[in-house]
Amino acid sequence: MATDKTLEIFFQNCDEEYCSVHAFFSRFQENPASKFNCGGCDYTANSCPAANYLRGETDKSLLQFKFMEKFKYAEENREKKTLGWQEIGFRWVLNGHAKKFGELYDLNGDDFSFDDIFLSN
């Protein structure tokens, strides 16, 4: 079960232009369900459907998604094109980032940074 601390990290950059919640659900479908629109949603309230759904995920899976999200942004900026989640998932695994994330999470919980993964590879 996702903790409030992880949900806070997950929802921290949701605004009108970009939302991690929409990105998370877009991995499974092209147009995330509008019921997961979190604009102005209080994710700590039981009335937030996105937060209620995400509480069923583990902290580890949500944090790994946030790291993959940063990786996707960096890859898209580097290549100057939009990349799909499937492509990012392949790269994440093939470049050893998934393994490194797992090792760091198992050792430190959530006490490590994006740079800890990428500066060590």
Image: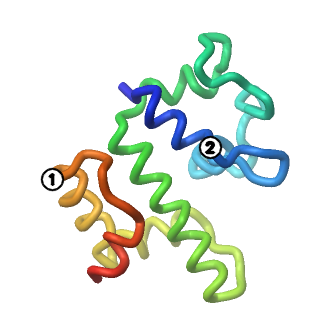
Q: Image height check: is 39 above or below 77?
A: above
Mark 1, Cα crowd under 10 Å, few <14 / some 14-19 / many 20+, is few
Q: Is mark 1 on a helix, strand or loop?
A: helix
Quadrant of the snapshot with the N terminus: top left
Residue highlighted by disc 1 = 107
Q: Position of residue 111 (x, y in %)?
A: 30, 51
**Identity of the amino acid at label 2?**
Gln
Q: Considering depth in this image, is 5 or 72 the residue closer to the camera?
A: 5
Q: Image height check: is 84 above or below 26?
A: below
> What is the residue that sits farthest to the right in this orientation?
16
Residue highlighted by disc 2 = 12
Q: Position of residue 66 (x, y in %)?
A: 49, 53
| Relative to 102, 119 lies left or right | right
Q: Image height check: is 12 above or below 84?
A: above
Quadrant for residue 50, please give it: top right
Quadrant of the snapshot with the C terminus: bottom left
> What is the residue that sits farthest to the top in this orientation?
46
Q: Residue at x 71, y 82 (%)?
A: 81
Quadrant for residue 51, please give it: top right
> What is the residue that sits farthest to the bottom in this orientation?
79
